[in-house]
Image (spheres, rainbow, N blue to C red):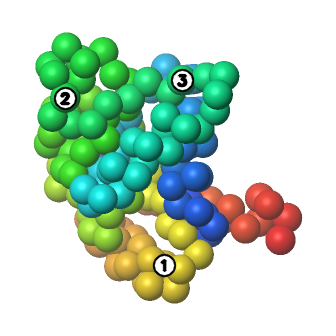
Amino acid sequence: MTELAFHFGAPDKLAYSCRLLRKAVGSGAKVVVVAKAETVAQLDAELWALSATEFIPHCVAGASESVVGRSPIILASHAQQAPHISDVLVNLTDTVPLGFDRFARVIEVVSTDAADRDLARQRWRQYTERGYSIARHDLNLKRGD
């Protein structure tokens, strides 16, 4: 069964996602990130600018087949745009992604914004209604706030 984790309290959702993706690639995982088109473009730009001394290999869904096949991170609007990856799904959307259950792990990144937290609570309920147990990671506690 798919492992689910909610990471609550990201002050900057995209910056946190970049660090999360760096860690995932470092561990050898293949990741699909689902987000709205404008968020995909923004995350793509942030991954390129994350560090002057390292590169986090990634591509946007729809890139050439050879690039998509070699990229450990695919940025997409829908998980179905990367059917060859089933390790980790990072959800930056407001809804439960279609096909999430084919992934070994799903990570929901939730900002400090009240509306984003409310939408995350709805997704949490939808997952639990389907019988999934969820790990909660409170990023505010980790920062020592």
The three-letter code of the residue at mark 1 reads Arg
In the image: residue 38, left or right of residue 135: left
Q: Looking at this view, is 123 or 45 the one in front?
A: 45
Left or right of residue 104, residue 63 in this image: left
What is the C-alpha distance between the residues marked 1 and 2?
Answer: 32 Å
Residue occupying image coordinates x 24% and y 23%: 68
- Say which element carries label 2: loop
Residue at the extreme right of the image, as rendered = 144
Which element carries disc 1, helix, strand or loop?
Answer: helix
Vertical side of 115 occupied by 106: above or below: above
Kind of residue indicated by mark 2:
Ala
Quadrant housing the N terminus: top left
Residue contact at pointers 1 and 2, CB within 8 angstroms: no
Q: Quadrant of the C terminus?
A: bottom right
Which is in the foreground here, disc 3 or disc 1?
Answer: 3
Q: Which of marks 3 and 2 is nearer the N terminus?
A: 3
The residue singled out by tag 1 in the image is: 117
Percent across and percent down for residue 139 are: 68, 62
Q: Which residue is drawn at 44% across and 24% down?
A: 57
Q: Residue 109 placed where, x, y %?
A: 48, 59
N-terminal of the two: label 3 or label 1?
3
Residue 88 in the figure: left or right of residue 26: left
Q: Mark 3 points at which residue?
A: 55
Q: In the rendering, at what x and y percent does residue 73 appear?
A: 37, 31
Residue at the disc numbered 2: 63
Where residue 91 sits, quadrant-wise, is bottom left
